[in-house]
Amino acid sequence: MIETVVRKRIEVLADKALQRRVTDAIDAAGITGWTIVPVTEGKGRDGKWREERVMGTDKVFVLTIAAEDRAQALAEAIAPMLTKYGFIFSMWDVEVIRGERF
């Protein structure tokens, strides 16, 4: 049987124009990698929205996986941005193979 370890998966929904703030915070927390996925539309408490390249409000998901301590450091760094920029931050436990990579 393959051995797995528990890590934290983190997703941050942010405006594309602000993705660098998120990736800089990930790097500063000592997390070794991240992935950016474009988001084309969604719906929240304020209703539906779609990407809007003309207005510069298209969104991205910034995804990463990290050990507990680094994930907590990232959460603390991102927290002030949540309200200021309207980011959405989620984090949960995942099992990974080759845990030393995260």
Image: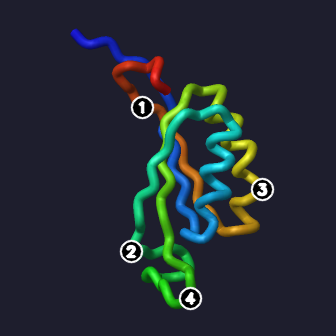
- Residue at the spot x=62%, y=43% of the render? 26
Residues at marks 4 and 2, CA–CA distance in whole angstroms: 14 Å
Q: Which residue is mark 3?
A: 80
- Residue 94: mark: 1
Residue type at mark 3: give it. Pro
Q: Are marks 3 and 1 in contact (CB under 8 Å)?
A: no
Residues at marks 1 and 2, CA–CA distance in whole angstroms: 26 Å
Q: Are marks 1 and 4 in contact (CB under 8 Å)?
A: no
| 4 or 2: mark nearer the eye | 4
| 1 or 4: mark nearer the eye | 4
Q: Are marks 4 and 2 in contact (CB under 8 Å)?
A: no
Residues at marks 1 and 4, CA–CA distance in whole angstroms: 36 Å
| 4 or 3: mark nearer the eye | 4
- Residue at the spot x=65%, y=68% of the render? 86
- Residue 10: mark: none
Residues at marks 3 and 1, CA–CA distance in whole angstroms: 25 Å
Q: Earlier in the sequence, mark 1 or mark 2?
A: 2
Q: Which residue is mark 4?
A: 55
